[in-house]
């Protein structure tokens, strides 16, 4: 998958292009990340990239004259690479955007090309949002200093769904939210930590029983911590039985 990044701090993205699953995906050519820095489009001596807001007040906005050409260049590059405009999306990360969840991640992973615009200062001019941005997305209801971290969160989550990135595909399926449930508890050596033993079922080698136990724990943990995720969700017979067992044990 090809990702275009518009950011004043492209070096921040080394956190995903050089490390871990996403770093390996870049090395293997499964993921390509290209950068456009609005500062490269500045023409003044000080290479200004911010500008004052009309109406006064604190804070600055990203300068229109340097931001717009950076976005336009990223779009042109996507087109030159042969990505269909209909399968290319320019997204801007901001608290005003659609909340990113695994369903949204799956949608974005279906694109041919994704261009992420990371804001700084108080954000971007509304007319740039209207003219140059296809969608606004938020990673949560809090205010960050820049859009780079949210952009990396989005790119990381989307990249995990690109075929071949995870290697053994299972972990994507078992991850929280892939099935709309919270993840089950996980355990590794040693068998006892501070007197707390690993659940015996996990030492049994009975893979069918282990699968059921893990599903029961995911359902139960979701019921306890995020009941909203179960609202309106149709559970199959096995899932309902396991959740009922969990609730009965929890009540005991
Ligand atoms: N929450 C979020 N989810 O996506 N982006 C944000 C976020 O706080 N963005 C900052 C607001 C102004 C600054 O430019 C960057």
Image (cartoon, helix red, strand yellow):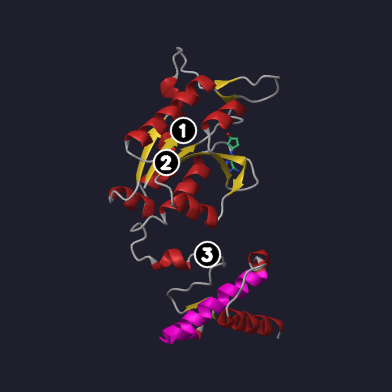
Question: Mark 2: few, some, or many residues within 10 Å (few <14, many ≥20)?
Answer: some
Q: Which residue corresponds to mark 1?
A: 7
168 and 112: which one is in front?
A: 112
The x and y percentages for residue 2 are 37, 43
The x and y percentages for residue 43 are 44, 14
Separation of marks 2 and 1 at Cα, in angstroms: 9 Å
**Rendered-image quadrant of the C terminus:** bottom right
- Residue ID at (47%, 53%): 157
Query: Relative to 27, is 64 above or below?
Result: above
Whichever of labels 3 and 1 marks the residue nearer the N terminus, that label is 1
Label 3 SS: loop
Q: Quadrant of residue 171?
A: bottom left
Is residue 134 within the magenta segment? Answer: no
132 and 194: which one is in front?
A: 132
Separation of marks 3 and 1 at Cα, in angstroms: 30 Å
Query: Relative to 15, is 197 above or below?
Result: below
Q: Which residue corresponds to mark 2?
A: 13
Q: Which residue corresponds to mark 3?
A: 176
Whichever of labels 3 and 2 marks the residue nearer the N terminus, that label is 2
């Amino acid at each position: 998958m090809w990702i275009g990044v518009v950011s004043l701090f492209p070096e921040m993205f080394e956190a995903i292009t050089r490390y871990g699953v996403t770093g390996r995906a870049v090395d293997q050519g499964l993921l390509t990340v290209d950068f456009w820095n609005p500062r490269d489009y500045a023409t003044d001596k000080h290479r200004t990239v911010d500008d004052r807001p009309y109406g006064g007040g604190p804070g600055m906005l990203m300068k229109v004259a340097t931001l717009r050409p950076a976005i336009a260049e990223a779009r042109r590059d996507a087109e030159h690479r042969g990505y269909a405009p209909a399968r290319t999306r320019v997204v801007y990360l901001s608290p005003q955007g659609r909340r990113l969840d695994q369903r949204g991640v799956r949608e974005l992973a279906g694109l041919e090309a994704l261009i992420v615009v990371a804001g700084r200062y108080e954000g971007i001019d509304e007319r740039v949002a209207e003219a140059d941005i296809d969608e606004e997305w938020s990673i949560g209801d809090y205010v960050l200093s820049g859009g780079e971290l949210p952009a990396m969160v989005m790119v990381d989550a989307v990249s995990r769904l690109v075929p071949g990135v995870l290697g053994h595909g299972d972990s994507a399926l078992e991850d929280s939210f892939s099935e709309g449930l919270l993840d089950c508890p996980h355990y590794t050596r040693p068998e006892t930590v501070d007197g707390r033993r690993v659940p015996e079922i996990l030492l049994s080698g009975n893979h069918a029983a282990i699968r059921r136990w893990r599903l029961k724990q995911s359902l139960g943990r979701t019921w306890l911590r995020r009941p909203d995720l179960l609202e309106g969700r149709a559970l199959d017979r096995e899932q309902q039985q396991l959740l009922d067992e969990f609730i009965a044990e929890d009540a005991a």
